[in-house]
Amino acid sequence: MKKTIKDYELNGKKVIIRCDFNVPIENGIIKDETRLKASLKTIRYARKMGAKVILLSHLGRIKTKEDKQKYTLKPVAEKLSKLLRKKVTFINQTRGEKLETAINTMKNKDVILIENTRFEDLEDKKESNNDEMLGKYWASLGDIFINDAFGTIHRNHASNLGIATHLPSGIGFLVENEIKNLTKLIDNPKTPYTIILGGSKVADKIGVIANLINKADYILISGGMAFTFLKAAGFSIGSSLCEKDKINYCKNLLDKYESKIVLPIDIITAKDIKENTKTYERFLGEIEEDEIGLDIGPKTTEVFKQYLDDCKTIFWNGPAGYFELKPFQNGTKTLLNIIANTKAYTVIGGGDTARAAADFNYQDKISHISTGGGASLAFLEGKKLEALDIIDEK
Ligand code: ADP
Ligand code: MG
């Protein structure tokens, strides 16, 4: 078991907390506060225990000097001050005298937010390549390191792996909660256990399929990835997405797990991907050459419902259709509604699937929606996560 923030005496200590404040910001305005709110529990706890709280996060990607203006964390400091009802002092540098002085004059319960860690990427990608001196420098600013950024747990950055190498470390409440919930999908999941996969590409999901197929009872295939499977099963797919180099993989999987993998039986197609376009419901074999499959049809959701209704565990990754456009939202909406109304333990992972759950107002009806897109998949693939492995054990 990993040490958590609760395993440390925090009073008077300088506690560096790596958060995930990678939020969408337009013209200085934060468009989605979910990640900020998700980080509050750990920050509040650290303050309550009398820590001097030093926050670090990345935001966007920094490739040019101009990116620095766009991706400053200043608006995050302002929003956090409001959410915490405590001034969060923003330091507009990632290293230097001003930062060091600010930290050395902190009182217990004070909060400092350091500028976007990826500003260090302008020079030799120091943050993203885990430059050793940078991790060591940041570690020198504090006494204890807490990793509460689940969204970057699959990346080896100076601000997570680097700092943890040089300080006593633990995980925060957000990371602890993610691990607890996602582990239920891997270690002795309650059965029947059904997985819904969708999204654009088979290639993105091969790792998850490999790690989970023997644990799940059924895998329901939807989204753009369904068409490579349908092609492999011998059906015409018109102009739908198709990964030619994955057809064989899909064929083998279908042969080996014939009774486990469930494919769509009807498809919503269109001739172009735009709002107000004419759509057609096609059964397998009916899709015409110039049609693109963009959602699963109503007969498919009825079939899927039978596999979901009496489940004890459901994991969903990848939208069932091109949910960004109205004509292709029904499949995703219907599946959300079905899983929201089961008694199962339900988990959504993947950035776009989580966004669909939020857009269609199902956040509160799902047992767990992961805050990490790629990170949740990496975790479920059983990938080695060095930034997590490095954290001290109890
Ligand atoms: P997640 O981020 O949840 O892991 P993905 O990134 O794999 O999901 O896939 C999300 C994308 O898949 C969405 O942008 C959606 O429009 C697209 N998608 C879903 N179904 C289709 C389809 N039939 N054709 C093309 N794109 C699709
Ligand atoms: Mg995605």
Image: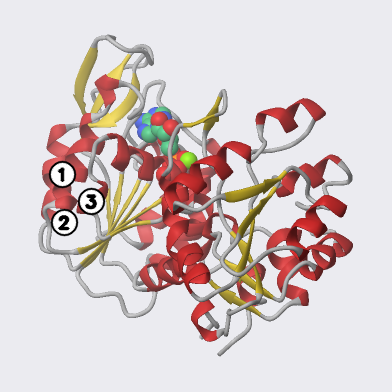
Q: Secondary structure at mark 2?
A: helix
Which residue bears the numbered disc 1?
A: 337
Say what amino acid the circle numbered 2 marks.
Tyr
The x, y position of residue 277, in whole percent, is 29, 9
Residue at 60% from the left image edge and 71% from the top image edge: 388
Left or right of 273 in this view: 378: right
* Label 2 near ligand 1 (CB < 8 Å): no
Q: Residues within 10 Å of mark 1 (few under 14, many from 20)?
A: some
The x, y position of residue 78, in whole percent, is 54, 41
Residue at 69% from the left image edge and 63% from the top image edge: 106
**Mark pair 1, 3: CA separation:** 12 Å
Say what amino acid the circle numbered 3 marks.
Asp
Say what amino acid the circle numbered 1 marks.
Asn
**Mark pair 2, 3: CA separation:** 22 Å
- The reply to whether discs 1 and 3 touch (Cβ–Cβ < 8 Å) is no
Q: Secondary structure at mark 3?
A: helix
Q: Residues within 10 Å of mark 2 (few under 14, many from 20)?
A: many
The x, y position of residue 180, in whole percent, is 39, 73
Residue 96 visible to an observer of this rendering: no
Point out the frontmost of discs 2 and 3. 3
The image quadrant that residue 280 belongs to is top left
**Mark pair 1, 2: CA separation:** 14 Å
- The reply to whether discs 2 and 3 touch (Cβ–Cβ < 8 Å) is no
Q: Give 308 or 18, whichever is nearer the viewer.
A: 18
Which residue bears the numbered disc 3?
A: 364
Q: Give 191 or 248, whichever is nearer the viewer.
A: 191
Left or right of 39 in this view: 337: left
Of labels 1 and 2, earlier in sequence is 2
Of labels 1 and 3, earlier in sequence is 1
- The reply to whether discs 1 and 2 touch (Cβ–Cβ < 8 Å) is no
Identify the residue at the far bottom of this view: 394
Which residue bears the numbered disc 2?
A: 307
